[in-house]
Image: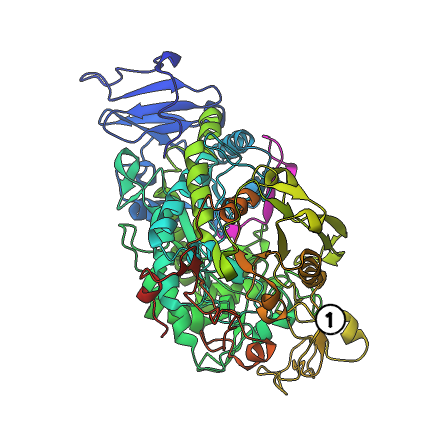
Amino acid sequence: MNFLRPSLPLAAGLLAACLAAAGCSRWSETDAGAFRVVHNSGGRTLAYAPASGVKLVTRNRFAFKDLNRSGALEPYEDWRLPARERARDLASRMTIEQIAGLMLYSSHQAVPEPGLSDAQVRFLREDNVRHVLVTSLASPETAAAWNNNLQALCESLAPGIPANVSSDPRHLPVADAEYNAGAGGQISMWPSSLGMAAAFDPGLVREFGRIAAREYRALGIATALSPQVDLATDPRWSRVGGTFGEHPGLAADLARAYVDGFQTSAGEDEIEEGWGYASVNTMVKHWPGGGTGEGGRDAHYAFGKYAVYPGGNFAQHLVPFLEGAFRLDGPTRRASAVMPYYTISHAIDPGGENVGNSYSRYIIDRLLRTEAGYDGVVCTDWGVTRDARAVDGFGTTPWGAEALTVAQRHYKIVMAGVDQFGGNNEAGPVLEAWRMGIAEHGEEWMRARMEQSAVRLLTNIFRVGLFENPYLDPGETGRTVGSPEFMRAGYAAQLRSVVMLKNRAAALPAARGKTVYLPMKFTPARRNFFGREEPARLDYAVSREIAEKYFRVTDDPAAADFALVVVDSPEGGTGYSAEDAGRGRNGYRPITLQYRPYRATAARARSLAGGDPLEPSADRSYRGTTARAANERDLETILAARRAIGPKPVVVAVRVSNPMVFAEFEREADAILLCLGIQDQALMEIVSGAAEPSGLLPIGMPADMAEVERQNEDVPFDMKCHVDTEGNAYDFGFGLSWHGVIRDGRAARYPKP
């Protein structure tokens, strides 16, 4: 959506008209302050910053931006031509330094104020970076103003390539935020991907994509670093919550809906083949599937670098890509970009090479480019060319290429068929790779290879309209992002994501106005996923202020009608302990999905993958070692509430990031709710009966940790699931409503393979 067109007053005045000798021109120009908007009657709307030095040229009574200041209309400046044709023309005109910059994707950039930082100006000017990843935004209006400054700078640098701003997912709820019918916010709040999967409804995910795309474009974001379509076939993986679950068919349908929602524009906003001003490029991840890390470990660390396939199930992990993101119902046909994961897909390359997926010619050139026929952008995950520092170092991930120099890693990645380097602001290594290619293949061949990537990258920028109009009206941005309509849709989706697993003796719903006991939750000091230390704290697990709008709240169990205990699923560690390694052990530990200390007596005696350059003699087995959940006290909170409340109902709400072992406390709970990324208010709506639970499990819950150890990392549905006191198995597709087990046909559409 072009956010300038509907909001700029025509009273800003006509600045140019009637320029063609044969009659009036078909364009007019209005002043928007720092930039001007050009309205082509029956053609594309343009915007440019006069301070950038860009002028207009007129052909056939239409206006075009003279981005390279030549005074002529070059094919890449002609908005009447197809995006791919324009991209080829521009790529052929670019210097190798400009192409190298185009192949970079910036490290994470915060936006605390409208102005650009010195570092941002430097990598835009000196390294020709045009793909920028943003993280925190001070406000929607600040983001819009920063975008305009960013785009004006890029426009001032010939050949005038606009910035393609991107974001990781940013729609998760703020737990204690309140919702009402007129609520607006920083951005609409939706359940996690796993939560949306619990609705078993591609239509819901498509609607999310449509709304999220409008909010992204209002913020200046034209590429989403999502969806994450990895199959969650190992319940221990730390990124399960970002997936659509373990079923290949459900994941494929939701991937297709997500990409269609984000990418498809319509009506006056359309440019070509469904693309337009309302479109957002999607970067589907992580090819060829990142959910099979050995022992459930994640590849952001060296100890999790190997993806393994003990069940021989590699091909099934391609299904969400091949049958989902690459086979859309909408006219854009396929996701416009792909991100491989960090992992080494161990023993998959028939040639025997074991390297990270971005380095693998077999994984990228053969499987993705040739067999899957994919000709869109391929971008590495962030930091894959940085030197590895330690086994437990975060975000330095040159797996399988540790012995190469940084420049050699870039060259190997380019030769594998990758177009872009995530998290790299510096063009130097790409230019060194260019020189290596000339030495091996000659300049003509290497120029063609670099232009091939440039065309792919530029096509994605052209077809979302950024070359014509990258500017935003901050006022319209403020009205669009987090609008009441969008907040309402996200809140409704949260309610649909809640899964009720147990409701013994109709403990729920609890009548509004009853007295509820809310025990305090203790969170110990710990190191988070990114290695940062977080202090200990003691507080309510939900907003007491919100709870009091539904129930009388007491700290005295004897005065309560029921207890509501809100906990997090077990935080079972990363699978490695530097302290253990320092004591002469190999450092590997199990990742536990239970609260109590877990000793891995059923684990493999030997790891599946081989040695490691950082520790060449180490075996990765953790058999016989013990892991402790960081939040073990959550279990004691549940059990203490049962002791304190006596025979009255205990309702347990679990904020789930991973599957978990329910056997430790399920017998003591009268009702169990799974919260997959919701506001506290949505939980109270369910508990009070204002809304009815309708979610279904998108992934099974294991009977015990022995089942977790026995299952294969690459195979879905190969665990025995927990069976509760009511005789219900917590298996894929299970969920309860107030009337009992839900059998409405949604789960039947996705039978287990």
Q: Residue furthest right?
A: 583
Amino acid type assigned to the residue bearing label 1 in the image: Ser
Query: Is residue 351 shown in magenta?
Result: no
In percent of width and height, residue 304 lies at 61, 71
In percent of width and height, residue 33 lies at 47, 19
Q: Depth check: 562 or 748 in front?
A: 562
Of the 4 image quadrants, the one containing the N terminus is top left
Relative to 573, is 144 on the left or the right? left
In percent of width and height, residue 139 lies at 56, 32
Relative to 60, is 454 on the left or the right? right
Q: Depth check: 228 or 459 in front?
A: 228
- The residue at which mark 1 appears reads as 577
The picture quadrant where one finds residue 294 is: bottom right
Placement of 590 over or under 740, stated as above or below? below
> What span is in magenta?
103-118
Relative to 589, is 495 on the left or the right? left
**Which SS class for mark 1?**
loop
The answer to whether residue 749 is visible is: yes
